[in-house]
């Protein structure tokens, strides 16, 4: 559904993405893992067209996304740090989004209800706490029932109850056959939520396979340990080569 | 969707309108001759309007960064976002100027020179809004962008005039009328000033050069040409800024 072909991105001298190749298929859910500054958010922003790759191509449903914007109708995006116009209230922002995406087939207001956001509709964005902003971001990402969901560290800053609400929601949508991309540092969450793992390090994709395979290869029942083993092996290999 | 941008309008615009309104009324109180008032207003229009337009626009652009970020993740064309921002800022500044200066001028009534003044003010607002957008997309840093914007203002309001004076003085032995005419077109503020001064029929004060300008700007084709050049000053920075914006990483 989304194919990333030889994408490179440089910011000045910094090589953020280095020849990234990825195929993301519908019905699967991908965990995007890697240390801070590895290029996860840049990769996500490239898919959204917010960052334009220096070279390479990203295709959505077989069509290049360069100079295209309609394809974003099919994506729900939850940013790492939700930034909203400070003077608008939650209700206004939700109404505005509905207005922009008028032709969305079905509205999914389950998260708005579960997070009890209706009661706060006339609160302005600058009065909200970080966690409530995250809730608004999550509710907006799921609101239009898009076939692709991109969640950038969705559970960071949420309270335990809300984390569970969000996880349940993600699992339901996964069962509905949506393509889900989750970037996170909490591997135990990803273990529950995702089927595939994409490990990004220094702008390169080092591993991309199913989580079951990874666990089998490393003989570790838990994803956290499995990834740690994977990184350890990688470092060993690198030190042997050099 | 542009309607929503208007929610973001701040108290600043009201303040700006009030400032213009008060100063125009005050000038009418001091002097009863509308032509003299228009002359005094001209200085405000040529200095204050560009300054406020360019600074306000640059700050506004950075304050609505979050908004643009939010929009970019939605199925909206980048150009539409940019155009929406531009139209919203430009129209609100133009309305503020029209209310602030236009209302008193219409009340006291001072004929065609007042109309020209309003026109010049509007075009200058547009020119400097365009320049501010250009300054804003050239850099990611808010302070830098405001710096560039102020530099534009200094350049067009003060530095360029100094350069022009030096140029005319240094080459005063040569017939310079046509060249200075061309040089004036390179500065929207000067162009507006000349258009305005000639409307006021005080070009006689400017001697031979004034008579020459009168010969050029006084004709309808000269007028059309200068208006066209002013509009180019609106369009070129805008298109340039749009092109940078559509290739920018956000």
Image (cartoon, grey):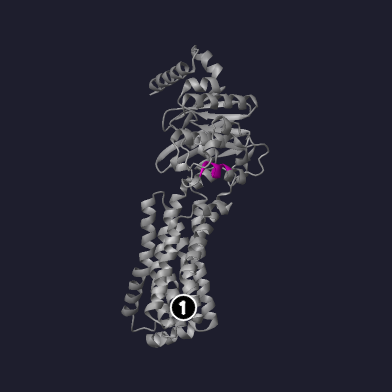
Residue placed most toward the observer, A228 or B205: B205
Q: Is residue B171 magenta?
A: no
Say if A83 sits above or below B62 in the image. above
Pinpoint the chain carrying mark 1.
Answer: B
Q: Position of residue A147 (x, y in %)?
A: 63, 33
Residue A98 position within the rendered picture, expressed as x and y whole percent measured from the top left = 61, 43
At 54% from the left and 27% from the top, the residue drawn is: A166
Q: Position of residue B32 (x, y in %)?
A: 41, 82
Q: What stretch is highlighted in magenta?
A: A89-94
Estimate the x, y position of residue A168 in percent, counting from the top left.
57, 24
Dot 1 corresponds to which residue? B195
Secondary structure state at the residue bearing disc 1: helix
Q: Nearer the viewer, residue B224 or B4?
A: B4
Task: Using the image, determine if residue B163 lies above or below residue B152.
Answer: below
Let me know if residue A18 appears in the view. no
In the rendered view, does B43 fall on the left or right side of B107?
left
């Amino acid at each position: 559904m989304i194919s990333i072909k030889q994408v490179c991105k440089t910011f000045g001298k910094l090589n953020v993405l280095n020849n990234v190749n990825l195929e993301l298929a519908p019905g699967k859910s991908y965990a995007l893992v890697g240390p801070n500054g590895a290029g996860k958010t840049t990769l996500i922003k490239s898919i959204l067209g917010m960052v334009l790759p220096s070279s390479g191509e990203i295709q959505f449903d077989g069509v290049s996304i360069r100079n295209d914007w309609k394809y974003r109708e099919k994506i729900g995006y939850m940013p790492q740090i939700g930034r909203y116009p400070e003077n608008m209230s939650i209700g206004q922002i939700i109404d505005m989004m509905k207005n922009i995406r008028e032709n969305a087939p079905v509205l999914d207001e389950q998260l708005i209800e579960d997070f009890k956001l209706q009661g706060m509709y006339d609160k302005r964005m600058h009065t909200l706490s970080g966690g409530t902003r995250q809730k608004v971001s999550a509710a907006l990402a799921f609101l239009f029932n898009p076939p692709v969901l991109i969640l950038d560290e969705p559970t960071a800053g949420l309270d335990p109850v809300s984390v569970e609400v969000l996880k349940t929601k993600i699992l339901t949508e996964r069962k509905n056959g949506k393509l889900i991309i989750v970037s996170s540092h909490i591997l135990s969450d990803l273990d529950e939520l995702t089927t595939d793992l994409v490990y990004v390090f220094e702008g390169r994709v080092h591993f991309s396979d199913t989580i079951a395979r990874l666990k089998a290869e490393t003989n570790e029942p838990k994803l956290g340990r499995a990834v740690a083993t994977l990184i350890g092996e990688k470092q060993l290999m690198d030190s042997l080569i050099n | 969707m542009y309607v929503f941008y208007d929610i973001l309008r701040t108290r600043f615009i009201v303040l700006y309108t009030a400032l213009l309104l008060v100063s125009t009324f005050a000038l009418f109180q001091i002097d009863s001759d509308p032509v003299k008032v228009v002359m005094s207003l001209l200085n405000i229009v040529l200095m204050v309007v560009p300054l406020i337009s360019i600074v306000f626009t640059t700050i506004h652009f950075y304050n609505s960064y979050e908004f643009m970020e939010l929009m970019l993740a939605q199925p909206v064309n980048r150009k539409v976002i940019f155009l929406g921002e531009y139209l919203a800022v430009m129209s609100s500044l133009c309305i503020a100027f029209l209310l602030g200066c236009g209302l008193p001028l219409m009340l006291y009534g001072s004929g065609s020179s007042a109309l020209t003044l309003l026109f010049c003010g509007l075009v200058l607002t547009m020119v400097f809004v365009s320049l501010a957008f250009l300054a804003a997309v050239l850099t990611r840093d808010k302070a830098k962008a405001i710096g560039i914007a102020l530099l534009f203002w200094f350049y067009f309001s003060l530095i360029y005039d100094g350069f022009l004076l030096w140029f005319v003085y240094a080459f005063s032995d040569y017939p310079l009328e046509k060249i200075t005419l061309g040089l004036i077109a390179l500065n929207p503020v000067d162009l507006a000033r000349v258009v305005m001064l000639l409307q006021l029929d005080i070009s006689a004060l400017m001697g031979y050069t004034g008579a020459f300008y009168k010969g050029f700007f006084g004709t309808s084709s000269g007028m059309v040409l200068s208006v066209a050049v002013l509009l180019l000053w609106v369009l070129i920075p805008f298109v340039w800024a749009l092109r940078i914006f559509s290739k920018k990483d956000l």
